[in-house]
Image (cartoon, grey):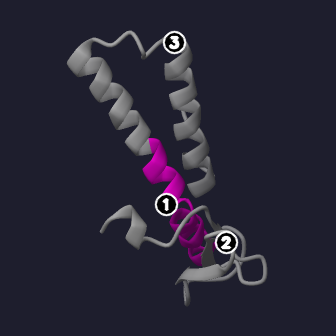
Amino acid sequence: MSSSSRTPGPWRQSGSDPLRVIGGDGFRIIPVATCANLGVGRGSRGDLNARLIAAAPDLLEACLSAVADLTDYIENRSENLTLEAASALRELLRDAVAKADDSPVPA
């Protein structure tokens, strides 16, 4: 599936129905998924599944960025992966994981 076939991100949990994940293209809200029959409260299985689904575009973006930077570094011994760039990449990954899950992310 190409990126143009996916519902555009960012995705988020619906404010009126936290078990529904919605995405938008700037003009409309597009239902992405509903996590039914798994509990409804904050921290329930349904809520946690909805958070993970809503974080999917962020997780994909962070992973693609990490793969590109690491590939460039490994294949070319690139100087582009400076400490500053590596720190920014780590923050991108941390933010994506934090959106998906409440688990602590290693420092």
Highlighted range, magenta: 44-62
Vertical relation: 98 (above or below) 24:
above
Residue in the picture at 51% in, 30% down:
89
User: Which tag, 1 or 2, sits closer to the chain's start?
Assistant: 2
The answer to which of 72 and 91 lies nearer the viewer is 72
User: Which tag, 3 or 2, sits closer to the chain's start?
Assistant: 2
Question: Dot 3 corresponds to which residue?
Answer: 83
Q: In the drawing, what numbered circle is on residue 13?
A: 2
Q: In the drawing, what numbered circle is on residue 88?
A: none
Quarter of the picture containing the C terminus is top right
Residue in the picture at 43% in, 71% down:
6
User: Marks 1 and 3, how far apart in space?
Assistant: 27 Å
The answer to which of 26 and 90 lies nearer the viewer is 26
Name the amino acid, label 2: Gln
User: Marks 3 and 2, how far apart in space?
Assistant: 34 Å
Question: Dot 1 corresponds to which residue?
Answer: 56
Residue 104 lies in what quarter of the image? top right
Magenta residues, dominant SS class: helix
